[in-house]
Amino acid sequence: MKDDTRNPRMDFLFKGILTLTTLEDCYHFFGDLCTPFELQEMAQRMQAAKMLSEGLIYSDIAERTGLSTATISRVNRALRYSTDGYAKVLETLKIQEMRERRNR
């Protein structure tokens, strides 16, 4: 995140998010914090980031997620030229998924 968006309120929000330890906690917190539309939009963007990292093309991603190609382009720019926020989360999720498969 750009330094010009950092402030004590954002720090407080992110520190709060870091206290969440279960999916149920996340559902409760984000359900209180965001509208259903906002949550759906964030979920769609995460799916787009995952699909882009897997090499899918914009038209397929738009069809599967319902996102506009403009939003997909924004996600792609963030994946390629931003602070690696999406990339770090996607890599961590991939590692967790591999561990879960091994433990089955």
Image (cartoon, rainbow, N blue to C red):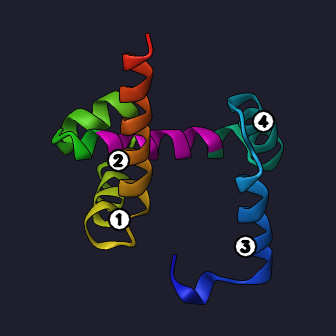
CA separation, marks 1 and 3?
20 Å
Left or right placement of residue 40 versus residue 10 in this view: left
Around disc 4, counting alpha carbons within 10 Å, would you say few (fewer than 14), some (14 to 19), or many (20 or more)? few
Q: In the image, what residue occupies the spot 58% across and 89% down?
A: 4
Which disc, if any, is residue 78? 1
According to the picture, the residue beneath numbered tag 2 turns out to be 49
| Residue 57, image x, y percentages | 16, 41
Going from N to C along the chain, the mark reached first, 1 or 3, is: 3
Highlighted magenta segment, given as a residue range: 39-50
CB atoms of marks 1 and 3 within 8 Å: no
Left or right placement of residue 29 versus residue 65 in this view: right
According to the picture, the residue beneath numbered tag 4 turns out to be 25
Going from N to C along the chain, the mark reached first, 4 or 1, is: 4
How many numbered tags mark residues here? 4
- Main SS of the magenta segment? helix
According to the picture, the residue beneath numbered tag 3 turns out to be 10
Say which amino acid is labelled 2.
Answer: Ala
